[in-house]
Image (cartoon, grey):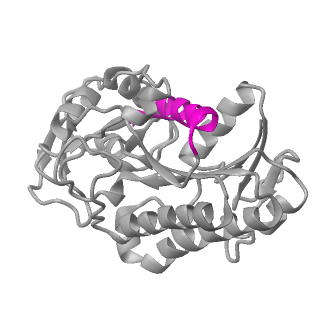
Amino acid sequence: MNILLIGSRGFIGSHLLKYFRKMNHVVWHADVVVDYKADQSYLLIDPSNANFKPLFEKQKYDICINCSGAASVPDSIKNPLRDFQLNIVNVFAMLDAIRTYQPKCKFINFSSAAVYGNPKSLPIKEESDLLPLSPYGKHKFISEQICREFYDNFGISTCSLRVFSAYGEGLFKQLFWDVFKKSQSENIIELYGTGNETRDFIYINDLVSVVDLVCHNGLFVGDSINVACGIGSKINDVISIFLGNFNREIHVSYAGKNREGDPLYWQANIDIIESMGFRAKYTLEEGLKNYFLWASSQSVN
């Protein structure tokens, strides 16, 4: 396949780039980061005025995977306009460029489980009510509607991936990085919530395998698909697993108050990706050990 990865310097994008190249696909990749050592397959995007049409004018792709965009609930509350631009306007611009120059190119858009908010029941199915709690979740929901719009009105093959709690090497933010960073100078760490909240974690290597399965087996009819392991894990239990990798005792306390925009309980129904052949290869213990070893190799300030 000829693949275009937009957002290739980010957490998920960088892993997809390595994977698809290892699988001997022809991969072009684009991001806003200036890199004077990059090869000719790297395409620079102007962060101040993103124009995606040049990406599609000359080079042909079988599939475009959008891994770009904002990915922070707190930031979306502080700067909703930026989140709107990156998660809505840019998605529309990408699809319009595909419509204009390469209408046969398939499009995968990374959405988020944040579109569900606090679900009425578990596990969460793709047809569950969408009740986003934050600008980030609402903007991801709108991006899914845009993908459906381009399928319904212009016949562009689109699909949105509702990623739950992804983690792994290269992720310099969110829960495990926060705990690791604090642990470098503290023996008592305070986290939001009560510790009884649940998340459905998926290790980055498993997530990459889902994307590969969707590329080959997805319907691409403007649909949305859950990307998770199908297991609801308590934050307190997961943190205990993670801290088991440290060579000293670290205590965790919980503030009892949830961060604005954060849901309480998540567990995904993953029937769709399982029907494509997905089986998680990594347990939380394995994934978190890999993450700990990677984090330990980084310079933490």
Q: Main secondary structure of the magenta part?
A: helix
Q: How many marks?
A: 0
Answer yes or no: is residue 115 visible.
yes
Image position of 252 (left or right of 49): left
Question: What residue is drawn where x is 30% and y is 65%?
Answer: 132
Image position of 81 (left or right of 20): left
Give the farthest residue toward the bottom: 81
**Residue 235: which quarter of the image?**
top left
Whether 227 is drawn above or below 130: the answer is: above
Q: Position of residue 39 (x, y in %)?
A: 85, 44
Q: Position of residue 41 (x, y in %)?
A: 84, 46
Question: What residue is drawn where x is 33% and y is 51%?
Answer: 127
Question: What residue is drawn where x is 42% and y is 35%?
Answer: 272
Question: What residue is drawn where x is 15% and y is 41%?
Answer: 252
**Residue 140: which quarter of the image?**
bottom left
- Is residue 227 inside the magenta stretch? no
The quarter in which the N terminus is drawn is top right
Q: What residue span does the magenta drawing correspond to? A: 202-219
Q: Position of residue 282 (x, y in %)?
A: 41, 21
Image position of 272 (left or right of 134): right
- The residue closer to the viewer here, 44 or 255, is 44
Answer yes or no: is residue 45 visible.
no
- The residue closer to the viewer here, 269 or 71, is 269
- Is residue 218 inside the magenta stretch? yes
- The residue closer to the viewer here, 54 or 104, is 104
